[in-house]
């Protein structure tokens, strides 16, 4: 129950469950490895070969028979040189050594490496003095010592990072199967909104939600599609959503979901779902900011159900709602196996006072690493749902449960929204 308005509220977890259950990972696509960064792997990749493919040396030095060095210091005759990239043509017979560089294949007969720093020139030309005993296998990287042929190299569900790209390249997995990245349309609603550099009339404001959300989509690895601004008119909004649903895998709208007379998004979504099929939900979420939220899965061409997030209009609310509801759903579409944001423990460096109102408060805070290794959080500034400056200064949302707040030094859970300071 919202103690301010008397409305029934639902928990954030409930809304996340409903929304996630209507979003399924997008179908798999084949892409080239050079485009793979940030995609979620849809199928396991197994090593097609041993990695490394042949036994080689980890150090510059001399390939020797370990037994020959038991009485070190000893002199061996150097019968050849093996740079990296060269196949051996000689056998290391007893009493001999081959000079070898990091990465070169182990020559037959040799079973250890005398590193160059533990050698010196021998008493005559063509000899080397091995100063210390070499144990069998010393500095040898056996074939398959990273991965054996057939081993799981990268598991389905992995978010491809630079090291995965490197590993897959070393296995010659040049094309991989990933979940498609959602194309996400962003549409603003409101008669007061102006885009472009024009002087504002009294009552007008610049559209900030669309730009902010398109940037968030870009940051989070989705493809943002700018669907412009629609007037506060049911028909105009409905057409915008309908057209967007044909072009996109998901839609974000802002504004028009509260209790005002001109709040047409929820009306438009309900009417659209009644006409074309799908489901719609009107939520009063027990959070502050971002209490109102419309969500619909709208039937579109090809039997698709396109999730539409009717985010609230206030700039901070729209971004918070994106962060805690839309982002997890988009991550699920993109194939992420754990799409919900992680709650991280931190310590309050300010008093975060509040009054009981039936809601979880999500405060805009600055999280930094404290001297004792724990994360500390302080307020990022004014906490009104129209006050974008504090959101811009923040790198985390602090979760302050219903009650009277949290005092300096107490534990508080946070959601990181940017890099830790
Ligand atoms: P609404 O949810 O449509 O009632 O809007 C709530 C508040 O958010 C109002 O003050 C709007 O002017 C503001 N607002 C709505 N959409 C935007 C937008 N795209 N950019 C900036 N402010 C907005
Ligand atoms: Mg509005």
Image (cartoon, grey):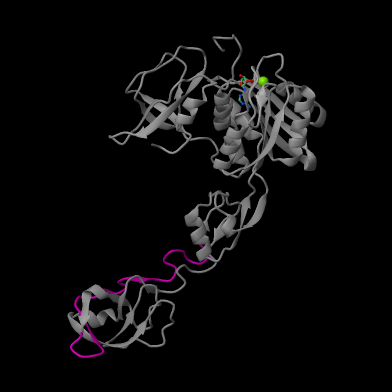
* Left or right: residue 354 compared with residue 14: left
Quarter of the view holding residue 257: top right
Question: How far across and down, in percent of the image, does residue 9 sit?
Answer: 59, 17
- Residue at the front extreme of this rendering: 199
Q: Residue at x 46, y 64 (%)?
A: 147
Pick the quarter of the image with the C terminus: top left
Q: Is residue 72 above or below residue 250?
A: below
Question: How far across and down, in percent of the image, does residue 386 sit?
Answer: 55, 21
- In front here: 325 or 136? 325
- In front here: 70 or 162? 162
Q: Residue at x 18, y 79 (%)?
A: 72
Question: How far across and down, in percent of the image, does residue 363 sit?
Answer: 46, 23
- Residue at the right extreme of this rendering: 275
Pick the quarter of the image with the N terminus: top right
Q: Is residue 245 above or below residue 84?
A: above
Please tell me whether residue 17 belongs to the stretch shown in magenta.
Answer: no
Q: Residue at x 20, y 80 (%)?
A: 120
Question: How far across and down, in percent of the image, does residue 18 sit?
Answer: 63, 29
Tally of numbered tags: 0
Q: Which residues are magenta?
A: 122-151
Res. 158 visible in picture: yes
Please tell me whether residue 123 belongs to the stretch shown in magenta.
Answer: yes
Quarter of the view holding residue 252: top right
Q: Is residue 259 above or below residue 332?
A: above
* Left or right: residue 369 compared with residue 300: left
User: Ligand 1 appears in which quadrant?
Assistant: top right
* Left or right: residue 158 compared with residue 61: right
Look at the magenta stretch and give its main secondary structure.
loop
Res. 312 visible in picture: no
Quarter of the view holding residue 26: top right
């Amino acid at each position: 129950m919202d103690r301010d308005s008397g409305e029934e509220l639902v928990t954030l977890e409930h809304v996340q469950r409903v929304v996630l259950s209507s979003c399924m990972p997008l179908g798999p696509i084949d892409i080239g490895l050079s485009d793979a960064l940030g995609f979620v792997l849809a199928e396991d990749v197994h090593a097609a070969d041993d990695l490394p493919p042949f036994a080689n040396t980890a150090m510059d030095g001399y390939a020797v028979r370990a037994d020959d060095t038991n009485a070190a210091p000893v002199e061996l005759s150097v019968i050849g040189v093996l740079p990296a990239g060269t196949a051996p043509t000689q056998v290391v017979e007893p009493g001999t050594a081959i000079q070898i560089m990091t990465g070169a294949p182990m020559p037959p007969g040799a079973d250890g490496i005398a590193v160059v720093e533990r050698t010196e020139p021998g008493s005559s030309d063509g000899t080397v003095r091995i100063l210390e005993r070499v144990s069998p296998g010393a500095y040898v990287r056996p074939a398959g010592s990273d991965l054996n042929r057939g081993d799981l190299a990268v598991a389905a569900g992995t978010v491809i990072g630079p090291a995965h790209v490197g590993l897959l390249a070393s296995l010659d997995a040049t094309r991989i199967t990933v979940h498609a990245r959602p194309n996400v349309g962003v549409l603003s609603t409101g008669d007061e909104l102006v885009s472009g550099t024009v002087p504002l009339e009294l009552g007008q404001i610049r559209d900030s939600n669309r730009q902010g959300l398109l940037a968030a989509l870009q940051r989070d690895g989705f493809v943002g599609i700018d669907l412009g601004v629609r007037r506060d008119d049911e028909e105009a909004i409905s057409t915008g959503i309908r057209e967007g649903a044909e072009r996109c895998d998901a839609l974000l709208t802002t504004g028009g979901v509260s209790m005002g007379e001109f709040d047409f998004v929820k009306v438009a979504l309900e009417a659209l779902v009644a006409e074309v099929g799908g489901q719609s939900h009107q939520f009063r979420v027990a959070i502050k900011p971002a209490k109102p939220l419309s969500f619909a899965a709208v039937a579109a061409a090809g039997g698709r159900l396109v999730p539409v997030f009717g985010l609230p209009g206030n700039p901070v609310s729209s971004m918070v709602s994106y962060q805690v509801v839309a982002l997890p759903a988009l991550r699920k579409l993109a194939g992420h196996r754990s799409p919900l944001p992680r709650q991280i423990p931190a310590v309050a460096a300010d008093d975060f006072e509040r009054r009981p109102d039936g809601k979880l408060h999500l405060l805009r805070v600055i999280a930094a690493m404290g001297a004792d290794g724990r994360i500390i959080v302080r307020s990022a500034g004014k906490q009104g749902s129209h006050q974008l400056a504090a959101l811009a200064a923040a790198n985390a949302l602090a979760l302050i449960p219903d009650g009277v707040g949290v005092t300096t030094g107490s534990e508080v859970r946070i959601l990181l929204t940017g890099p830790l300071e």
